[in-house]
Amino acid sequence: MARYDAERLGNGLSRVRPLRPDDPVLKEGYFSKLTDSTSGRVWGTRQENTPLTNINREDDTSLPTGTRTISMETFQKYRDRIMEAIDKMTYLAENGQRQPLNIDILGDIVEASNLSPNRQYYGEWGLHNIGHLLIALCHDPEYKHRVTHFEYYDFWIKAKLEFLVWLTDFSGKYATFIIPPPPPHKSTPPPHKSTPTPIHPHPYPPPQFLWGNVRYLGNLTLPQGISRCPIKIVGVDGGGGGIINAKHMGVMGDTSANMRDPAFYRWHKYIDELFDLYKQTMQPYNPTGGELQLVWDGVQVQNIQVQAESSRQGLAVPPQNVLRTFRMRSHVDLSRGLDYLRWGENLGPIFARTTHLNHDAFTYTINVQNNGAARTGTIRIYLAPRFNEHGERLPMVQQRLLFFELDKFTTQLNPGVNAITRRSTQSNVTIPWDQSFRQLERSVQAPSAEQSACGCGWPQHMLIPRGNPSGQLYDLVVFVTNGEDDRVVNPQPANNRGRDNCRQAMAYCGILDQLYPDRKPMGYPFDRNPYTVPSPSNPNGAQIPVPNLDEYISRIPNMRTIQVRIVYDAERIDIRGDDGVPTGMRVISGDPLTPVRPGACGNGGARGSSPLHHRHRCLHLLPVPLYQDLLGRRPITLHVVKPAAGLEFLQIVDLK
């Protein structure tokens, strides 16, 4: 959330406001314009100012048992019980006894899992998951707008054999199916007048009479050698008819899409708020004395410099402590997000081209004075916005919540001055662009948990926020702590089987089957309120939290801060190059779907394609010669039609 707030401030937006159960109104509407490829249903939409209310969807079999009926009273009751546990620093166990609360148990209560100490008392599905469901179903909480069957009028359907890629063959053809009306159901469809003649050739498979819903169209006669075939509806047309398609829950009900919804961040801001309330019950870390004191005697951070590189020929190197961000055009291996047929030993790469945020790599230079014997230090590097959305300096009590980790590593500190250099690409928070499951799958028959864990990590190209064109100021903090005190001893060595070529983001993800490799709490020292100092206006009165970062650090010699300016170049778009795309892959690209008025589709199109009118858009389908041309033996590269749309869809229009 700290990283997201930093991005919002760089884009001229305010920080996220938490969505609290006491004020459960979502002012932000959301229309994803996405379709759930598994069920074929459109994701539910949400109007502005939609309240969260009781859920009563007993007949909705798509929901797990126990989540079909949820009352706001129960939701708020679970919240109150968690607040009680935080306030008393104890939780109610299943045996009715109160036990000491810690951060791990609080997480088990909020999330709800097999580790939850009392699921009946704190919620079978957990406060966090219930919140997701309430938001996902708020557009139709009582299931009034469901559709019990699909009404077929006089129409035909274009279905595309979707993303079939393998070593020895490829099929991406379109086929036409003539679908008669279904038998009478609860309501009788209009009488079927005639079977329209398909307007588009269908070389294979031959037309078949099928009926069903979007989830299942029936059995297809597939080309020889193809054992299964996913189907995707790409067009519906016909005289006075169509499909009434039931809307799915909102994207907040699915982890693959929920981060698109602004409500995701509002709800998670509140969940973070609960954990911070727990942290606020604990004593602040003090420069000296107390739990986990901040000062490491004999160690001083003398100087910090950040120097960006120039990744583009002819572009000058920026001044010290100035970082540059820009847009980059890259290919994404969609194998991690698409389920498509694989044949033989080939894993069938499909790449999409997209435009995303990136930055010039940079190097930290940190000078650390060690006045004692040689020892091991932990270098912790954090970044946070310096000013709030109103241009005011952030007080320490607020800024601490905006610090996010850039890197954390151990190093040897010899007596005297130690000049430590560290490249941004070495960060223990991130994984590189090309570290995908596809590379790992090539090395093993079936990826296990060990190999899959390599996909965990913050993307390297998103290490720093965008900033703004005039240059946004951030506070960069370097904190050096005692490496021996931080070291975690695991009962058994780490299992790196199958991960020889994997760079692990240990600070972000930990280590598989190991204890988290840091004895300090995550976010230390910004996870707790700042220590207190005498008030300037009343030195003999009650103490107040240290007002700002500069004063906070002034009492801690092993911590230092500098101001870093992040400049966003809005005109710059770099090209990543081949980006791992296999040599010789063909490119299929085309123009985006063009919104038009009904009936405005002409006969033109890409290389003689036929137009199909669907939902006020013209979709140009591939003609027969291109079908035959697609039967090559090599994989292809698919280009995203609308890169700015965030990979919302792919469209094959023409072949180059």
Image: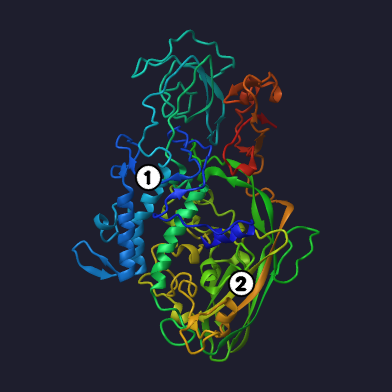
Query: Between tags 2 and 1, which lies in front?
Result: 1
Q: Does residue 370 appear in this view?
A: yes
Q: Residues within 10 Å of mark 2 (few under 14, many from 20)?
A: many
Pinpoint residue 57: horizontal percent, then vertical percent.
32, 38
Q: Quadrant of the C terminus?
A: top right
Pinpoint residue 442: horizontal percent, then vertical percent.
51, 48
Residue at the extreme right of the image, as rendered = 314
- Disc 2: which residue: 476
Residue contact between numbered discs 2 and 1, judged by CB atoms under 8 Å: no
Q: Residue at 59% x, 16% y: name it.
A: 201
Marks 2 and 1, the one that precedes in the sequence? 1
- Relative placement, left or right, of 360 versus 144 is right
Q: Residue at 42% x, 59% y: name it.
A: 271
Q: Residue at 48% x, 24% y: name it.
A: 224
Element type at marker 1?
loop
Q: Does residue 515 appear in this view?
A: no
Residue at the extreme left of the image, as rendered = 95
- Distance in Å between CA atoms under marks 2 and 1: 43 Å
Pinpoint residue 471: horizontal percent, then vertical percent.
71, 63
**Vertical side of 337 occupied by 208: above or below:** above
> In the rendered structure, which amino acid carries the disc numbered 2?
Leu
Q: Residues within 10 Å of mark 1 (few under 14, many from 20)?
A: many
Q: Residue at 43% x, 24% y: name it.
A: 217
Residue at the extreme bottom of the image, as rendered = 372
> In the rendered structure, which amino acid carries the disc numbered 1?
Thr
- Relative placement, left or right, of 316 versus 247 is right
**Vertical side of 526 occupied by 645: above or below:** above
Pinpoint residue 474: horizontal percent, then vertical percent.
63, 68
Element type at marker 2?
strand
- Disc 1: which residue: 53
Q: Quadrant of residue 280?
A: bottom left
